[in-house]
Amino acid sequence: MTGGSGFMGRRLTAELVSRGHTVRVLVRAGSARKIAAGAQAVIGDALDKSSYAGVVAPADTFVHLVGVSHPSPSKAEQFRQIDAKSAMNAIAAASESGVKHFVYLSVAQPAPIMQAYIAVRAECEQALRASGLNATVLRPWYVLGPGRRWPLLLVPMYWMLELFPGTRESAQRLGLLTIDQMVAALVTAVEEPASGFRVLGVPEIRRAGQTRTI
């Protein structure tokens, strides 16, 4: 797993460990203490494939969660230098190591804002599809969690938009998710690997959260 020391990664790692999975998390030197208890630290740099490609195997699934924190339109260059570069490295490393399944955290698309962010994630999805790896791509829009509650103020607006046929699909595609729903969907992706290329949008992520308790 890359990004395993972050907002979503720590929670996912802890849940997978509790379910009996062996989880190895890529971290930079000195950051091993940031990962969840029970996981194994792999020292390397997500932006330098040579620093970790040789130790990806043995692994059944590669989970890639690296991304610029708190995305905003002002971070377009960071999306290219961090999100895109780390994903391309991860896809190549997984392919070279014979990984059977790749889980990629993307973003809901299309959307009226955050075009640079969406463009980078779409390019990474295309590269993943072209790699031939069995893959699950998750496309959340905004994930609610500690320190990330303000969009709850928008819930009444979402309810209204979902009432009307002309706005229903976009309101569902760009809907809000909780961190528990995301972790549940990621666990499902790991434990029920795709055969081919599978995309889970917000509605599918919500359904995974309903069927699996975290």
Image (cartoon, helix red, strand yellow):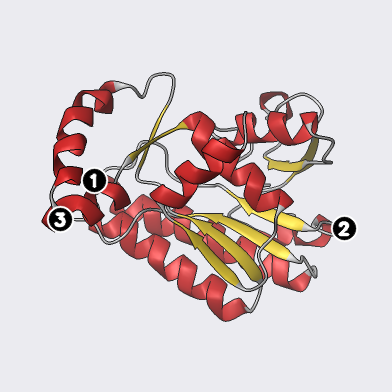
Q: Is residue 146 above or below residue 182?
A: above
Query: Seen in the image, is 1 located left or right of residue 149?
Result: right
Query: Seen in the image, is 9 located left or right of residue 193?
Result: left
Residue 165: assigned label: 3
Rendered location of residue 114, percent (x, y): 24, 52
**Disc nearer the start of the sequence (1/3):** 1
Residue shown at 28% from the left, 58% from the top: 116
Q: Is residue 61 above or below residue 179?
A: below
- Asked if labels 2 and 1 touch by Cβ distance under 8 angstroms, the answer is no
Query: Seen in the image, is 73 located left or right of residue 77?
Result: left
Residue 58: assigned label: 2
Residue furthest top in the image: 146
Residue furthest right in the image: 58
Rendered location of residue 211, percent (x, y): 59, 39
Which quarter of the figure has residue 95? bottom right
Badge 1 amino acid: Ser
Q: Which residue is mark 1?
A: 74
- Disc 3, SS: helix
